[in-house]
């Protein structure tokens, strides 16, 4: 049975002031419950690799800084997802 420890719980102010520390902990697999005034607000948990995490749909970092014409955007999406996807 998984029991809570003081390391699993953090105050909202502490989280804001030391965000990088908690990001590192979550990246290492820890889950953290965030409280404000003795009331739990939310839980931060790592994304499970088996769930698939995030999927890159299109990477705009490879595009110019002047915007992308819609035709080019649609062509890139069709190319990434194959012609069987209907994007209109």
Image (cartoon, rainbow, N blue to C red):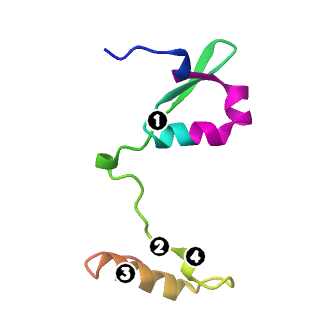
Task: Report how far apart the C-alphas of labels 4 and 1 lie in the structure.
Answer: 27 Å
Whether residue 9 is in magenta: the answer is yes
Whether residue 60 is in magenta: the answer is no
Q: What are the residue bounds of the magenta stretch?
A: 8-23
Task: Report how far apart the C-alphas of labels 1 and 2 lie in the structure.
Answer: 26 Å
How many neighbours does mark 4 have within 10 angstroms: few (below 14), some (14-19), or many (20 or more)? few
Q: Nearer the viewer, mark 1 or mark 2?
A: 1
Task: Report how far apart the C-alphas of labels 2 and 4 lie in the structure.
Answer: 9 Å
- The residue depicted at 69 percent of the width and 85 percent of the height is 66
Q: Earlier in the sequence, mark 3 or mark 4?
A: 4
Residue tagged by mark 3?
A: 78
Residue tagged by mark 1?
A: 45
- The residue depicted at 58 percent of the width and 86 percent of the height is 69
Question: Is residue 79 positioned above or below 51 on the image?
Answer: below
Residue tagged by mark 4?
A: 61
Task: Report how far apart the C-alphas of labels 1 and 3 lie in the structure.
Answer: 33 Å
Q: Nearer the viewer, mark 3 or mark 2?
A: 2
Q: Quadrant of residue 22?
A: top right
Question: Is residue 39 positioned above or below 52 on the image?
Answer: above
Quadrant in the picture for the C terminus: bottom left
Dominant secondary structure of the residues highlighted in magenta in the image: helix
Given contact means CB atoms under 8 Å apart, are the residues at marks 3 and 2 in contact? no
Q: Residue furthest left?
A: 84
Q: Which mark is residue 58?
A: 2
Q: Earlier in the sequence, mark 4 or mark 1?
A: 1
Given contact means CB atoms under 8 Å apart, are the residues at marks 1 and 3 in contact? no
- The residue depicted at 54 percent of the width and 83 percent of the height is 70
Question: Is residue 49 positioned above or below 70 on the image?
Answer: above
Q: Earlier in the sequence, mark 1 or mark 3?
A: 1
Q: Position of residue 11 (x, y in %)?
A: 66, 22
Q: Nearer the viewer, mark 3 or mark 4?
A: 4
């Amino acid at each position: 049975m998984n029991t809570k420890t003081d390391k699993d719980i953090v105050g909202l102010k502490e989280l804001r002031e030391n965000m990088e520390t908690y990001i590192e902990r979550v990246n290492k697999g820890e889950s953290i419950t965030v409280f404000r005034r003795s009331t739990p607000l939310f839980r931060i948990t790592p994304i499970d690799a088996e769930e698939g995490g995030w999927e890159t749909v299109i990477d705009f970092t490879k595009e110019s800084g002047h915007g992308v014409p819609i035709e080019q955007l649609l062509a890139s999406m069709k190319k990434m997802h194959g012609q069987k996807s209907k994007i209109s």
